[in-house]
Amino acid sequence: MAAPQIELTERAAKRIHAILESEKAGVLRISVEGGGCSGFSYKFDLDETAGEDDTLLERDGAKVAIDAASLPFLADCTIDFSDDLIGATFRIENPNATAACGCGVSFSV
């Protein structure tokens, strides 16, 4: 079975790189947890390093770690960053999600 493809856009990579530098962190950790208004929610944390079982994405100085349990939920997704009138936020375009809440933080499969 092929490894899931996850795209990190240029905008997201630039913002992640800036955050990692300003916070003196090694990686941005993205995980999926049970809960939220649609069943699952995305969680973003800063960490010193990626774990042994993590999938590590790298682009333009940005490093993103995804744990093995979260990886199937994020397969074939695109991680983007949006800075508009509503606010600045990371957005995950997830083709596996059958529904999502209005805030874009929780989803169902």
Image (tube, rainbow, N blue to C red):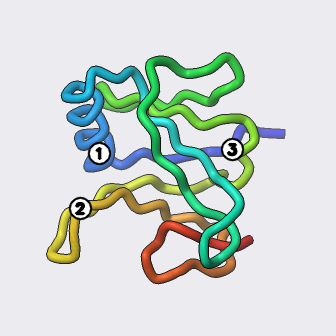
Q: Residue at x 70, y 71 (%)?
A: 39
**In the rendered image, the vertical position of residue 81 relative to residue 18, given as above or below:** below
Compute the Cα span from label 1 to label 3.
21 Å
What residue is at 27 percent from the left and 21 percent from the top?
Answer: 24
Q: Which residue is mark 1?
A: 10
Relative to 20, does residue 5 appear above or below in the rendering? below
What amino acid type is highlighted by mark number 1?
Glu
What residue is rendered at 61% in x and 78% in y?
Answer: 37
Observer-side mark, 3 or 2, equals 2
Disc 3 to disc 2, C-alpha distance: 24 Å
The image shows residue 30 at horizontal and vertical percentages of 53, 43
Q: Is residue 23 above or below residue 107?
A: above
Does 95 sit above or below residue 33? below
> Mark 1 vs mark 2: which is more N-terminal?
1
Which label sits on residue 88? 2
Where is residue 79? Give x, y as percent: 44, 53
Amino acid carrying mark 3 in the image: Leu
Residue labelled with disc 3: 71
- Asked where in the image residue 61 lies, by quadrant, the reply is top left
Callout 2: 10 Å neighbours few (<14), some, many (20+)?
few
Q: Nearer the viewer, residue 71 or 78?
A: 71
Q: Are marks 1 and 2 in contact (CB under 8 Å)?
A: no
Residue 68, picture quadrant: top right
Judged by depth in the image, the label closer to the viewer, 1 or 2, is 2
Element type at mark 1: helix
Q: Residues within 10 Å of mark 3 (few under 14, many from 20)?
A: many
Neighbours of disc 1 within 10 Å: few (<14), some (14-19), many (20+)? some
Which residue ends up furthest to the right in the rendered image?
1
- Quadrant where the C terminus is found in the figure: bottom right
Whole-percent x, y for residue 71 in the image: 69, 44
